Image: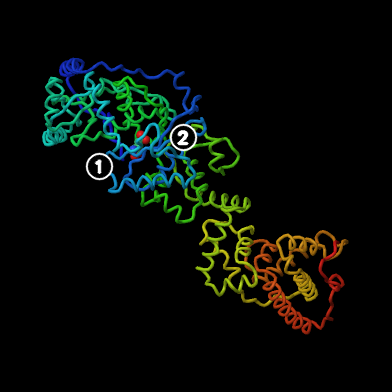
Amino acid sequence: MRPRTAGSIRSSFWTCDSCRSSLSKRRVAQQPTHSVKRPLSSSQRLYRGKLPDTPARTRFAPSPTGNLHLGSIRTALFNYLLARKTKGQFLLRLEDTDQKRTLPVPKRSYIKIFSGLVYNGMKVGPVVGGPFGPYRQSERLHSYQAHLKGLVQSGHAYHCFCTPERLDELNRRRHDLGLELGYDRKCAAIDPEQAHDRAVAGEAHVVRFRAPDRWPRYNDLVFGNSGHGDKGNKKLYSDAPVWEDAILLKRDGFPTYHWANVCDDHDMNITHVVRGSEWMSSTPLHVAMYEAKSWKPPIYAHVPLLVDSNKQKLSKRNFDIDIASYQVRGIFKEALINFTALLGWSHQGKNDVFNLQELEEAFDLKITKGNTIVAFGKLQYLQEQHARRRISAGGEPFEQMIRDVSVALLERFGAGKVVNLVGKRDLRDVVANMLQADSLPYRSAAEFAEQCSIFAEVPRLSKPDVKDVELHKELSVAASTLTLVPDAEWTYQTHAESLKQLDFAKGPDADTADRKKWKTELYHYLRWALLDGARGPSMPHIMAILGRDICVERIARAAKETRLATQTESNASSRPDVTTTAFKSAAWPPTSP
Ligand code: GLU
């Protein structure tokens, strides 16, 4: 739900001195006695960003008016991390009192929100039947009514019987005069006993909060000393005065968002509230309500808005999409959580890659005040990093990646090509090799499969450019020695070892430059032979992915092409056919240099 502004519009018109003083006297007479908060001292401001010393009890309180978006996940996550870091508790509360906005099936939406949090690894609880439940506001109506009683008795709230038509007329007139809107307190003058009787008799009414003379200030953990400045609540006019007397209970008997939120945070012993900065304009009203009830308000930490690279607030149009769509796109929960945590929070660590547990350890309230630009490139980077972590950790998350990529390969290339590539092997093992290869970043199964076209498609072999006949013969023989590895030993490690040995095929006495040149030529030759020169992972990975049968076939095909090309070249230059001694005794296993 969008916050309603309390005291956010500033007076901008002139009122003569005598009106001002008579209005001000009337105002003082009508006001109940709220404490007027002075700005906080610098020592009080010191705790900005500081974590509480005692366990924080936090909550995520979404209104079920839509799906979970990036901003809501961030709010949930910061509340969660604050609770975990301080060994406190985190709970989920559904703010579903706005009947017009709540989805028709709130229970389903509750489950959706809940599973969204759990998908992201957060331990939420209890949802049903906990000691502070129920956790849906629509099931707590009795408590909002009960808390209201004391407030009416103490004069901090009053019944208002004004019709919507009268209020519309009042606002329309003020609007036409260019004056600020508010309520003229007509019903505040009704004797409370009379008002009570009229309400009990069933006359349509709302209950209004009698706003304090000045809005209290509060100490925000992110923004420091906050509030509406020295601004008084009453609007001065050339017309009659009005006040920001917020409605607490609506004509339908439901509480407004503000009242329900304050009552619940009090009843549920919430100590800290992390929420979007769009709520800051409502916080003085909330604090005033706590003061009117003589309750201790929670400590607030407002987090900045999320904006796109054009500094526009995130919306569906510019990607503030439903969290479920990240799931559908195959974004890992740890990548999404990691990305979300970095939206406004900064840390001292060397790199930005954190899983939820690492975040729980590192979290503090060093949250920026400025709007946060959401750069989706970072999400891709984190996805790749977390993919690497999943691959090296192995286990079920890795197996799931294997299954997803297998499906994506079949969808992208069709069963025929996949079967040709896999041969006698197990598809699972081939895909595992692909995922373990370097230079193949993983963003999603579909994007990963796309990169694997170099393996799934059979490359045509371009004609070799043979300038040095002897060198090409040597390369062809060296490549053939690699195919001597038996099937059972056809692994990345074996090829890495064999290739290391072939680096020294020029003999132990070859000088470094020669050896380097030879190595470059060999890798170049093999990449041509196996993939027609396509870029991709390193050679041992390529060989492991293609498997023995395909490598043998392609290396033989390349040898034939080389032979043809070298013969043409030899004939042209009438040079003798020389096979160097280095490869005359090619055998498996190769011997050390
Ligand atoms: N129900 C409010 C929302 O939808 C929560 C505000 C709060 O956290 O106090 O954003």
Alpha carbons under labels 2 and 1: distance apart: 35 Å
Q: Quadrant of residue 519?
A: bottom right
| Quadrant position of ligand 1 | top left
567 vs 346, left or right, is right
121 vs 8, left or right, is right
- Residue at numbered disc 2: 368
SS for callout 2: loop
Q: Which residue is at 34% across, 18% downward?
A: 37
Q: Amino acid at mark 2?
A: Thr
- Label 1 packing within 10 angstroms: few (<14), some (14-19), many (20+): few
State the residue in front, 140 or 112. 140
Q: Which residue is at 11% across, 27% downward?
A: 198
Q: Position of residue 370 (x, y in %)?
A: 43, 36
192 vs 535, left or right, is left
State the residue in front, 214 or 321. 321
The label on residue 155 is none
Q: Quadrant of residue 478?
A: bottom right
Q: Position of residue 515 (x, y in %)?
A: 80, 62
- Residue at numbered disc 1: 99
Q: Quadrant of residue 239?
A: top left
State the residue in front, 49 or 525. 49
Vertical placement of 16 versus 509: above or below?
above
**Pair 2/1: label in front:** 1
- Label 2 packing within 10 angstroms: few (<14), some (14-19), many (20+): some
Quadrant (top left/top right/bottom left/bottom right) for the N terminus: top left
SS for callout 1: loop
Q: How many marks?
A: 2
Vertical placement of 477 versus 437: above or below?
below
Q: How is the image coloured?
A: rainbow
Q: Position of residue 62 (x, y in %)?
A: 36, 40
Vertical placement of 176 versus 292: above or below?
below
